[in-house]
């Protein structure tokens, strides 16, 4: 056995070791015997041989891609400079060239010439926001678990034009939950579930679909009646803010500058918050029409809190700790076409793709379709990868790219348009998103409950028609007599 020179390089040592190994194999038969393959049938030998060749080619291809694709070079550059070699999408957006002045001048002139009295943004709560919010009862009609059955349904005559439907829906929801509660009775509060279901069912309003009311009320009941402490929390919240939309992970509050502007600024200005590291605020505002903002006052005067009449915005708050996560909005409402646009939620980078962001979109979309909208679209900057991922997670269908669609921050924007139709929502998109948010068991229970209640509602409708027809026949007979 040859001696290894202590002064030899590592490569020379490897060469010598390899020579010692290969010297023992004088032929292919020696190799087969060494690996225990000599006794195998010929077909299996070829199989192992081809497997080895495929493995070798795969490893070689990966190494070639890493070397010639520049991955190793980027890793080396990043280790030297400490900076990421591949630019993020919002950085690419910031580097877009500004439009020429001669292209921007006609825009201002056309607006002034043709639309001198065009609508302006304001901070008032829009009718669309009010419609999407839960319907609150009159202050005198707050119901507690200590109320008698008569008191529970003894609604006052205030706001009679609004409250007739609320009273009927509350009574109907209460009875529905009595017939089939969504869980076990809370200790010491036997009617807590009935009341929770009833106020959510009535809060959906008269114009939403019955299937939506049942599903939302069941979700609300499961969240608020999870424990005694949860019942206390949401009963108090209902008393103070009955217009809020409640989900499992978050709740939506109609956006209000006085209540929310400081919190929105805190989670989007790039500073560390809630043990989350600092970040570049352009990650939040790079693809928005305005921002970043230097102060809460500047943010308050922006599009986030100033709205057109065909827009609505809601603050997203976590149920666990009541912290604000961001803002979700809808815009470009076209009731004549039953179409509306869901804007990409404004949240911090740590909430991109989170269940809070997804549920905020789900709660808004579900209520929009329940009111009868046929189409919801999302328009996203063609360079915005996070926005594209969100549309995909929500189940939207990519419909195309609109070139030179908008002028944003004095530069051209191409927009990718994604759509969700009511037919797609009903045929499976809603169930898929519901399952993603709440789990397969809740999704299955929701579908089973809605199917059963739909059958009962149809039976009641047919029975009511038969009774009405019989009444008409009796009336006609009396007239003849």
Image (cartoon, rainbow, N blue to C red):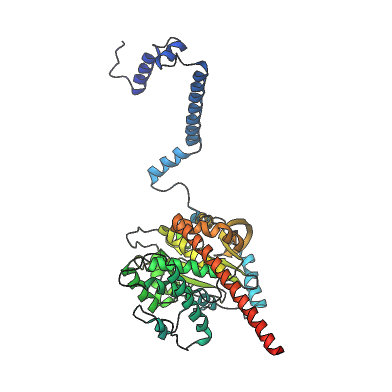
Query: What residue is at 47 percent from the left and 68 percent from the top?
Result: 216
Quarter of the picture holding the C terminus: bottom right
Q: Could you tell me residue 210's position as x and y percent?
A: 54, 70
Could you tell me residue 127's position as x and y percent?
54, 78
In which quarter of the view is residue 425 placed? bottom right
Residue 197 located left or right of residue 371: left
Query: Residue 195, can we see it?
Result: yes
**Residue at 61% of width from left, 78% of height from top?**
467
Location of the N terminus (image quadrant): top left
Is 191 on the left-hand or right-hand side of 386?
Answer: left
The picture quadrant where one finds residue 150 is: bottom left
- Counting labels gives 0
Relative image position of residue 308 (x, y in whole percent): 55, 75
Does residue 218 lie above or below 394 as drawn?
Answer: below
Report the residue that reaches farthest toward the left: 6
Specify the farthest residue to the front.
Answer: 481
Q: Nearer the viewer, residue 37 or 344?
A: 37
Q: Nearer the viewer, residue 414 or 395?
A: 395
**Relative vertical location of residue 261 with respect to residue 436 in this rendering, above or below:** below
């Amino acid at each position: 056995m040859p001696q290894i020179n202590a002064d030899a390089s590592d490569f020379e040592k490897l060469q010598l070791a390899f020579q010692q190994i290969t010297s023992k194999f004088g032929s292919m038969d020696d190799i087969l015997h060494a690996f225990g393959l000599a006794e195998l049938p010929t077909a299996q030998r070829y199989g192992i041989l081809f497997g080895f060749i495929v493995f070798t080619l795969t490893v070689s291809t990966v190494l070639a891609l890493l070397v010639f694709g520049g991955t190793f070079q980027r890793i080396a550059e990043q280790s030297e400079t400490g900076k990421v070699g591949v630019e993020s999408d919002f950085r690419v957006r910031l580097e877009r060239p500004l439009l020429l002045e001669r292209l921007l001048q006609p825009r201002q002139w056309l607006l002034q010439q043709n639309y001198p009295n065009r609508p302006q943004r304001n901070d008032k709560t829009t009718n669309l926001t009010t419609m999407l919010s839960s319907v609150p009862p009159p202050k005198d009609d707050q119901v507690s678990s200590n109320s008698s059955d008569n008191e529970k349904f003894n609604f006052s005559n205030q706001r009679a034009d609004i409250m007739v439907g609320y009273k009927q829906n509350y009574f109907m929801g209460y009875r529905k939950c009595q017939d089939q509660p969504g869980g076990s009775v809370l200790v010491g509060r036997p009617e807590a579930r009935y009341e929770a279901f009833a106020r959510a069912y009535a809060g959906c309003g008269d114009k939403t679909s019955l299937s939506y009311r049942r599903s939302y009320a069941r979700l609300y009941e499961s969240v608020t009646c999870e424990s005694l402490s949860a019942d206390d929390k949401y009963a108090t919240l209902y008393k103070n803010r009955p217009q809020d939309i409640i989900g499992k992970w978050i709740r939506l509050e109609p956006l209000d500058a006085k209540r929310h502007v400081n919190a929105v600024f805190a989670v989007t200005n790039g500073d560390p918050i809630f043990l989350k590291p600092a970040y570049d605020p352009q990650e939040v505002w790079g693809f928005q029409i305005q921002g970043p903002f230097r102060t809460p006052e500047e943010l308050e005067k922006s599009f986030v809190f100033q709205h057109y009449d065909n827009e609505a915005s809601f603050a997203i708050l976590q149920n666990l700790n009541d912290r604000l996560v961001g803002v979700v909005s809808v815009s470009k409402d076209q009731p004549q076409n039953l179409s509306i646009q869901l804007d990409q939620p404004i949240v911090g980078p740590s909430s991109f793709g989170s269940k809070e962001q997804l549920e905020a979109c789900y709660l808004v979309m579900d209520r929009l379709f329940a009111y009868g909208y046929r189409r919801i679209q999302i328009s996203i900057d063609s360079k915005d990868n996070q926005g594209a991922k969100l549309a995909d997670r929500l189940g939207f269908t990519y419909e195309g790219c609109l070139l030179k669609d908008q002028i944003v921050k004095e530069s051209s924007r191409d927009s990718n348009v994604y759509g969700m139709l009511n037919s797609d929502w009903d045929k499976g998109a809603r169930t898929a998103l519901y399952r993603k948010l709440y789990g397969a068991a809740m999704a299955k229970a929701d579908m089973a409950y809605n199917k059963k209640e739909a059958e009962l509602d149809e039976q009641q409708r047919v029975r009511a028609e038969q009774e009405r027809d019989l009444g008409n026949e009796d009336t006609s007979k009396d007239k003849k007599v």
